[in-house]
Image (cartoon, rainbow, N blue to C red):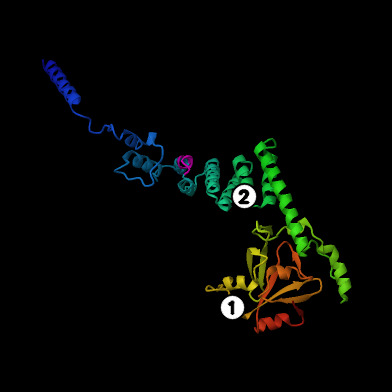
């Protein structure tokens, strides 16, 4: 009897519930007027993720985010979730947030190297679409270091080099890629593009150098001692002063090279040497029309270099020289002169793709000692 009573009570309760369900609106139902807006709050159906996730407004999304960033899970699992999160942002073209997610995934330092390569190449892609070519190239290089034959990393590295106008490097990336993927059409296309631009830019640059009378030192020959003849010196320089494409390659660690801007001005990688302190400065793009005093004023402005403990290196006290190694002569440069004026001097030869200059402090004991016994001429 008890069971039958319970059954009757249960049935009565269900009928009551159903009657109430029919007459009362469901409190959590979508409204007829705002159903699309409310539908978009459901993570599975969201078209775009909100900039800030408010747990009260987006409880389901906040729950998912908590799962993704759960520090108790294995690093590989966390990194994979962050990769997926970054991919979701990437598809929405929210590249900045994608970069943050990929970076967070890399910080997990998981042992899955394939996953790390994907995180790096994906972050490189996000940087690429934001125009951060140098960062994209760095990520592609890091991915290639882990997995040298990774196709996406090789393609992205070549694309970045082309965008950065370092076409020689782009060719190298393509050649490395084609060794591992000889039939890959994208790499073949990128190599053809890089090689075409490289030849064109180099030809234009050499043409402009010839027009300006700038000479490149392409080889080292034994110095001819015991002769002060100007004719003999000019003759011995002829072989090494001829323009050569190899002379345009900078040996600086930055890989910077002379380039021609859209206005027809050359920009040079320039090296400043401070022998007193065995220090140096490197300007990657010194426009030929700029004066030396302008750069030195910026370099030694409000913040002096830490090695200048005596605060002697102020532009008004500086002396600038370039060295003619063949004749063993130092030429003093007027700081008001432009780079082009100095490069056009008959005894200036660009060595290793980077014009270099010696900086001394006028009147200092080191300056006097350094110049003792040297032939010095003014421009």
Q: Nearer the viewer, residue 32 or 369?
A: 32
Instruction: Pinpoint residue 151: horizontal percent, then vertical percent.
Output: 62, 40
Indicate the quadrant containing the C terminus: top left, top right, bottom left or bottom right. Answer: bottom right
Residue 6 numbered mark, or none:
none
Instruction: Pinpoint residue 211: horizontal percent, then vertical percent.
Output: 77, 62
Q: Main secondary structure of the magenta part?
A: helix
* Left-right relation of 128 to 25: right
* Left-right relation of 106 to 70: right
Q: Secondary structure at mark 1?
A: loop
Q: Rate crowding at label 2 as few (under 14), some (14 to 19) or many (20 or more) other CA atoms within 10 Å.
A: some
Q: Mark 2 highlights which residue? A: 163
How many numbered tags mark residues here?
A: 2
Tell me which residue sits at (40%, 44%) in the image: 69
Report if residue 257 is visible in the image. no
* Left-right relation of 233 to 366: right
Question: Which comes sooner in the sequence, label 1 or label 2?
Answer: 2
Instruction: Please tell me in which quadrant of the rendered image residue 37 appears.
Output: top left
Tell me which residue sits at (67%, 81%) in the image: 366
Decide: is 55 above or below 316.
above
Instruction: Pinpoint residue 324: horizontal percent, then vertical percent.
Output: 77, 72
Instruction: Pinpoint residue 217: horizontal percent, then vertical percent.
Output: 78, 63
Q: Residue furthest front?
A: 263
Q: CA distance from mark 1 to mark 2?
A: 37 Å
Q: Nearer the viewer, residue 238 or 275?
A: 238
Pointers 1 and 2 in contact (C-beta within 8 Å)? no
Q: Secondary structure at mark 2?
A: helix
* Left-right relation of 36 to 228: left
Q: Which residues are magenta?
A: 87-93
Q: Is residue 90 magenta?
A: yes
Q: Mark 1 highlights which residue? A: 314
């Amino acid at each position: 009897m008890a069971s039958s009573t319970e059954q009757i009570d249960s049935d009565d309760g269900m009928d009551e519930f159903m009657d109430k369900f029919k007459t009362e609106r469901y409190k959590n139902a979508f409204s007829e007027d705002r159903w699309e807006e409310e539908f978009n709050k459901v993570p599975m159906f969201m078209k775009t993720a909100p900039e800030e996730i408010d747990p009260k407004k987006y409880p389901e999304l906040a729950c998912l985010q908590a799962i993704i960033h759960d520090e108790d899970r294995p690093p590989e699992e966390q990194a994979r979730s962050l990769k997926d999160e970054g991919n979701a942002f990437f598809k929405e073209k929210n590249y900045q947030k994608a970069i943050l997610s990929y970076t967070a995934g890399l910080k997990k330092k998981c042992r899955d190297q394939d996953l790390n390569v994907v995180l790096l190449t994906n972050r490189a892609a996000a940087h690429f679409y934001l125009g951060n070519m140098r960062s994209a190239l760095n990520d592609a290089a890091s991915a290639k270091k882990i997995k040298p034959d990774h196709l996406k990393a090789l393609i992205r590295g070549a694309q970045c080099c082309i965008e950065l106008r370092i076409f020689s490097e782009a060719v190298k990336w393509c050649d490395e890629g084609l060794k591992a993927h000889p039939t890959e059409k994208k790499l073949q296309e990128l190599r053809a593009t890089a090689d075409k631009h490289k030849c064109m830019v180099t030809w234009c640059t050499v043409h402009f150098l010839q027009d300006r009378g700038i000479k490149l030192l392409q080889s080292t020959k034994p110095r001819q001692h015991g002769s002060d003849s100007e004719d003999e010196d000019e003759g011995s320089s002829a072989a090494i002063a001829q323009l050569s494409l190899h002379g345009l390659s900078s040996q600086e660690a930055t890989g910077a090279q002379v380039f021609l801007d859209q206005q027809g001005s050359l920009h040079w990688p320039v090296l400043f040497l401070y022998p007193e302190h065995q220090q140096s400065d490197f300007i990657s793009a010194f426009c030929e029309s700029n004066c030396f005093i302008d750069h030195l004023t910026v370099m030694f402005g409000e913040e002096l270099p830490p090695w200048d403990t005596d605060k002697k290196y102020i532009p008004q006290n500086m002396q600038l020289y370039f060295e003619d190694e063949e004749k063993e002569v130092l030429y003093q440069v007027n700081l008001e002169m432009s780079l082009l004026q100095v490069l056009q001097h008959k005894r200036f030869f660009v060595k290793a793709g980077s014009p270099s200059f010696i900086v001394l402090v006028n009147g200092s004991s080191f300056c006097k000692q350094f110049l003792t016994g040297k032939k010095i001429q003014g421009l």
